Image (cartoon, rainbow, N blue to C red):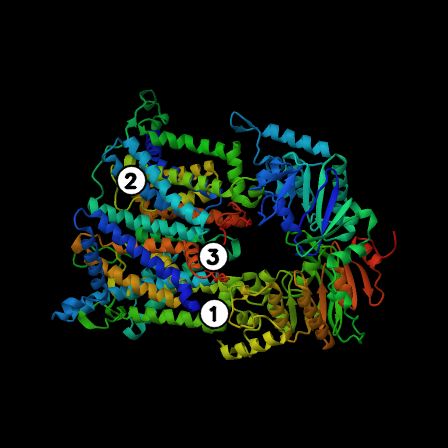
Amino acid sequence: MLEIVTRLLFATLDAAPALVFAALGAVLSERAGVVAVGIEGMMRVGAFCAAVAALTVPTPLAVVGGMLAGAALAAVHAYLCIRWRSDQVVSGIALNLVALAGGTFLLETHYGPNGTPPIQQLTAWDWPALSSVPLLGALSGHAAPTYLALALPFLLQALLTRTPLGLRLRAVGDKPHAVATLGLSVPALRWGAVVGGGLLAGLGGAVLSTTVLDRFEQHTPAGLGFMALAAMVFGRWTPLGAFLAAAFFAFGNALRIGLASSAPGLLELVPQGVLLALPYVLTLLVLTLQGQRSRAPAALGVPYEQESR
Amino acid sequence: MSLDIHAGELLAVVGENGAGKSSLMNVLYGLYHPDSGEVSVEGRPERFRSPRDAIDRGIGMVHQHFMLVPTLTVAENVVLGREPTRWGRLDMERAVREVADTCARFGFTLDPRARVDALTVGSQQKVEIVKALHRGARVLVLDEPTAVLTPQEADELARVMKDLVRAGRTVVLISHKLKEVLGVADRIAVMRRGRLVTEVRAADTTADQLAALMVGDAPRAATDEPAPVAQAPGEVLVEAKALHALGDNHCPALRGVDLTVRAGEVVGIAGVDGNGQRELAEVLTGLRRLTSGGGTLLGGPLARLTPAVARERGVGHVPEDRLRRAVVKALSVEENVALGRHTKPPFAKGPWIDFAGRRERTRELLAAYDVRPPEPTLVLQALSGGNQQKVVVARELDAKPRLLVVVQPTRGLDIGAVAQVHARLREARRQGTGVVLVSLDLEEVLALADRVYVLFEGRVTGEFTRPDYDERELGRRMLGAERAHG
Amino acid sequence: MGERARQALPSVLSVLLSLVVCWLLIALTRDADGFTTATAAYLQMLWGGIGDWPTFLGGSPVAVLTRPIGEAAMKAALLTLTGLSVAVAFKVGLFNIGAQGQMLLGALAAAVVGSHVELPALLHIPAALLGAALAGAAWAGIAAALRLYRGVHEVISTIMLNWVALRLVDNWLVVGPLRGVAQAGASITGTAEIHASAALPRLLGDVSRLNLGFPLAMLAAVAVWLWLERTRTGFETRAVGLGDEAARAAGIPVARRAGLAMALAGALAGSAGAVLVLGTEGRYPGTLGAPYGFDGIAISLIGNNHPLGVALAALFFGAIRAGGTRMQLLDVHKSFPELIQGLALLFVAGRLIWLSVLRRRRAPAPVLSAPTAPTPEAPHA
């Protein structure tokens, strides 16, 4: 039994980082008041660029490349939404479509339909001291992103709640005009948050290509960005909440995969499709129960217009 | 224009809406940039690129609409932008201490750890003041600070302002409420249409003189017109009993209002802003649910009234917030003229829109009400505010309402438009419409109304009938004095 | 320039700019002779969309025209319906990101009615279409109800509902309870084949896949336009979308208008699913794949949320996407037109940039700010 749980935890820790990073990126952007529907596209770009870069440079460097690519797409979003006050949802959707079609086009043009050639995955670190301990053993044998995904939520939570920058970011998401009258730059804060969110989303995508897989595949990230949005909402727009939600979703997924192989009979009763739909159903349920009190930043999605002339 | 502000004085800047008071102060605060001219502080010319520059030079501003982040605490709001830190981390303990210190120094009672959205409006305003003081403001600009306050809170604020001046700070009070200004200010600057008209010492002037200065030579539409000719009141249109309703903040806004409106009379509703007038108008037009009480309105029950039913019974409505409630600014003028009556001829034929009929009726109305430009197809937001309001009044009166509820019908309009709106209301009254006029402008109410109800904190504290209008007594009632003296 | 033309200008310029940028993308990623290749690829895309006129004029059978046109029309029909779905929701002030999910359920409903019910063709097709429309409307209705009664923002709820629909349909219903019975030992994926009586008739016989779905979609565009512009209820719907408080004060039943418009949006997206299943697929396949629901967002916005603009945009992108297959001749992947579409949407999103550029070029006349698309307000959800 303990062994099964350990294995489940291991699978969760292996699969969760991408979702966690993307969810954190979404939280960062939305807490500053900019809708993060484009997270899926940023992940895709990050995944693609990381995989392509890893063909020529060391994989860790390629991951950084993926992050930068995600940030670049986020910068387009920021330019349209902050500088030109475009509709944030439209811009996000457009970026998703561009990333989807553009990724396919470049992949097919240069590498063919089966994805990029295989690359060197990020090295998994073994902790011999841990691996023999029950439960804790699940912590051993992951690549760096897993450990980062365990630490980053706490760091981001601390950033948002315990630092001046975090205070300003939260304020800009709730009432940008108040921030402006104090002489702080609303655009600068939002740019930072959106591009930071893009870095994290790009990291999430890069992690998909370099640890979960060993290449960029046609459908990457296959909706994981939208699940990250669900995790963000489920986690009430806080880094720790989003992390827990993402971890919960990833664990549920690991459980489902585990059941599919070990206890197929059970899946006769509860079909896979129902389990796969569960994260989204739960998120809807949470929203329904909370109604308008769901803690979304007050100025989310509202373009900031300075009244100065 | 130029204006000097002396250290340690309480200067009031008065003027009508649109006279340029707020723009002036936004320039001073670095939010707007002047096309020409300059701001000097202590003799040194300054170029404020942003509020930060103004803050650095010791200028603080309390905006009419509070600039507080509702989800943050008092202390967080106050230190935002210049947060105390320890090793890069926000030092909340110190922030709380500092804010508590500032509060103590100026005699405010605020809990630094309370969340702002849990505070009363009066307390939120104090947070704004503390915010400015905490930044070392020596000059404090307050923009229409009492508009949202209860009279008690306004009195409290007057005391605070005087204390601040005594403590060596300079206070600039922007207002259009003359009595309040006379009560606190040392010096009064009067603005009219973007110019400084004059400066007077508060001790040397009266409200009447100030009013004359504010309005200028132009004849004031409301006061120059003859008083309405008495006419026999007609049938009872509204008989409301013990109306109770909640405000937007879910607090009781109406607390037992009785009200009668007859055909052919103008009933004025007077009171300080935020004492339930708006909610009363919304109840009469079906926009706000009653929590208890009722009565009849145009032959039907008042309880559970909806906007559609109200219109069906013959209620017309000129709401206060024109762009939100009265018109859809992105629709054309003719579509706005049809709004609310779009299911009836000449605006509809069966389920279809009657384009020709709508166009023709719109043209007639635009001509009759002198709307410029008289273009039915123009997007409504292309019209000036005054012309938009004319469209609204034209639409509502064209429906031949039996009861017309008008809220602040002339706010922000130029004098010509004001005169026209007033004439139209009088015309409606002559033709037997019952008019309920809600206005914060007491002069407007007294000029038009046959009868006036004074509202204070959701109750009727006085009822006056023309010609027995005693302005002083009215004023007392508006501040909550009950019928009997004392 | 007329007001209508001015309104359309940013969209037209966006599409043109996107075509140029994508042309450069091909040209610059080819080692040799990129510009020739890019131009040739665009020509192939054109012939693949509007028919291969050079070959036809050179004496080939008419099928070289009708086949591509049929493909283009089918894609245009689907894009029109999903685009209308998004546009109708926009008109009432809601952002329907959920056309995809609504379309999936519509497709499933059409497949079930088409295969499990026996009716004469005259009734079977309407029944299947109606089933699809109702399924889509119900799915959209969930989002509308959540918005109206619980204040859940429709952007979030429709995104979630898309995934719920996808998982439930593709990963459960189609592979489980509703899976078609294998015939003659061969296992099939997806639901059972629909009866011939439910299939949308081909309009040109064997020379093209053009079927009844195309005229139906065009009819839908005209009908939605007439409804919005010419009827009382359409006027009320637009008024709610542009100013719901003013609409309420005018006695318009705001919640009913919003709910009905959202249901209509779902019905249109559901019909797209039906046209896909009854017209070309013949059943709900293992997975529906094509994200026409998401494309609908692009089509609606490029069409300026105007029903006829949507139809135009759908015709254009239907044609070039049908032509995408022929670009493969020049080693350009068939998804290329989707990139053109995505970039066009991105450029449309920068509508204010276009307006400021256009304004600067024109005389400094006081430009009245044109009524922009109803921008859904912040997700309070």
Q: Relative to B157, does residue B386 appear above or below in the rendering?
A: below
Gap between marks 2 and 1, in whole Å?
47 Å
Residue pictured at 17% horizontal, 54% vertical: C330
The quadrant in which residue C73 appears is bottom left
Q: Chain of mark 3?
A: C
Residue position for label 3: C375
Gap between marks 1 and 3, in whole Å?
19 Å
Gap between marks 2 and 3, in whole Å?
33 Å
Q: Amino acid at mark 1?
A: Gly
Residue position for label 2: A49
The secondary element bearing badge 2 is classed as helix
Residue pictured at 63% horizontal, 54% vertical: B248
The residue lying toward the viewer, choosing from A152 and B63, is: B63
| Position of residue B362 measured from the top left corner of the image (x, y, whole percent) | 56, 75
| Position of residue A241 measured from the top left corner of the image (x, y, whole percent) | 46, 38
Marks 1 and 3 share the same chain: yes
Q: Chain of mark 2?
A: A
Residue position for label 1: C234
Can residue B339 be seen?
A: yes
**The N terminus of chain C lies in quadrant:** bottom left
